[in-house]
Image (tube, grey):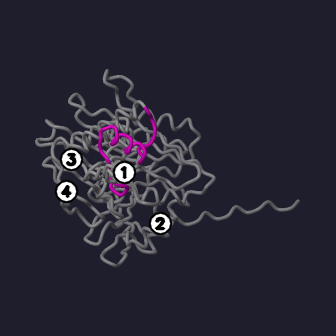
Amino acid sequence: MTYSPTVLTTAPAPAPAPAPSPSPTSTELSRLLDQVRQDLVLRPGVVDVPRITRLLREDGRVLGAASTLELTARVRDHVDGLGPLQSLLAPGVTDVLVNDDGQVWLDSGTGLVRSDLRLDPGQARDLAVRLATAGGRRLDDAVPWADAHLPSGIRFHAILPPLSTGGTIISLRLPAAKALDLDALHDRGTFGPAIREVLRAVIAARVPFLVTGGTGTGKTTLLAAMLKEVPAGERIIVVEDVLELAVDHPHVVHLQSRHANSEGAGEVDLTALVRQSLRMRPDRIVLGECRGAEIRELLQALNTGHEGGCGTVHANTARDVPARLEALGALGGLDRAALAAQVGSALEVVLHLGRAHTGRRLEEIALLHRDADGMLVTATALRVEGDHLREGPAAAELAARLAPAPASPGRRAA
């Protein structure tokens, strides 16, 4: 009898699943970004997890679910957002600044603070060019600066070398999470209850006014808050170089200037837009920022029956506003006497903002008028000194101007 041993066979063990790859390095992320941009050209759409997963598999990489979600968010920030700056957009941040040495500074309303982030020259330039393109502006060696309004509402400005002595300089002004009204600004300490009622009276009385102050003092924020008080039945035409003024009002039309193209054609400046606004049946014409010859067109518009117009002007103090207006008027061909005559019947109130260690504050309300020599001057009506509100020589005149008009007597019955 022959013995035949039984041969035991077992199924082959399954091949181990590939271990998830670690998070990509900066070089791998850069390569993936190039792949995503090329893929978006072929397959337009959103940057989502399925797209990133497919591109990783085509590249022979596998990531876990959590890592894929994180990577998708990072890629989306670079494609649609602010790239390496996206993580700095915390609540309350109003400005993000990238200096020519790559250092990044933040302002949350109480002053600039340096962050731990630092961009290398290539990162800063690539980010600036992409953001300029997203805002419809050109930024390259031929046009080394750009000012744009991004789709997210962020105000963007950048300057490339050699105009900057180091690397690319980027300045971002972030919009508020929600439009602030006068009550919200009061709660933040921008002004007290008495000033709040004066501001509402300025709008109700259709008094033409200027919001003045230095850079970052909150001029646009205050102007938007005041325009929210405009009656819903009035039409507001806003003219700006770059869209920045977000007005919470049911009837607002925005006009934005256009820069010349690469051939130097197609430019439409603020002066032309102010002229066009006069043909659009405006109740109030708003010039987001007066910075040049367009001041002449605005003054002419306010002198032709368009009450309640307003705008912003950079000035160090309320007393400096006449000199600032004279400089702008000179760009529009107006001498001092002509400007004073135009302003005397077109603009009345100056609302001046400043910065203190506690934040932005409305420091002074002044009236514009002509002196004995016919020159333009300001007279203080109300001034904030610490926690006190002081009346100035023009307080009575301001109160009389803002007093409600007496009701017209009704017709007697026949």
C-alpha gap between disc 3 and disc 4? 15 Å
Give the amino acid at mark 1. Answer: Ala
Which residue is denoted by mark 3 in the rendering?
26
Residue 292 visible in the displayed image: yes
Give the amino acid at mark 4. Answer: Leu
Q: Earlier in the sequence, mark 3 or mark 4?
A: 3
- Position of 202 with respect to 14 (left or right) is right
Instruction: Please give the label number shown on residue 117.
Output: 4
Residue 112 percent location from the top left of the image: 22, 62
- Asked where in the image residue 396 lies, by quadrant, the reply is bottom left
Residue 173 visible in the displayed image: no
Residues at circles 4 and 2 in contact by the CB criterion of under 8 Å: no
Q: Earlier in the sequence, mark 4 or mark 2?
A: 4
Residues at circles 3 and 4 in contact by the CB criterion of under 8 Å: no
Give the amino acid at mark 2. Answer: Leu
In the orientation shown, which residue stands out farthest toward the right?
A: 414
Question: Is 328 a magenta residue?
Answer: no
Q: Residue drawn at (40%, 54%), measured in percent from left and top?
A: 210
- Position of 129 with respect to 338 (left or right) is left
C-alpha gap between disc 4 and disc 2? 35 Å
Q: Residues within 10 Å of mark 1 (few under 14, many from 20)?
A: few
Instruction: Please give the label number shown on residue 11.
Output: 1
Question: Is 50 a magenta residue?
Answer: yes
Q: Residues within 10 Å of mark 2 (few under 14, many from 20)?
A: many
Residue 239 percent location from the top left of the image: 45, 42
Q: Viewer-nearest of labels 4 and 1? A: 1
Element type where label 4 sits in the image: strand
Q: Earlier in the sequence, mark 2 or mark 3?
A: 3
From which residue to which does the magenta span run? 43-67
Give the amino acid at mark 3. Answer: Ser
- Position of 233 with respect to 178 (left or right) is right
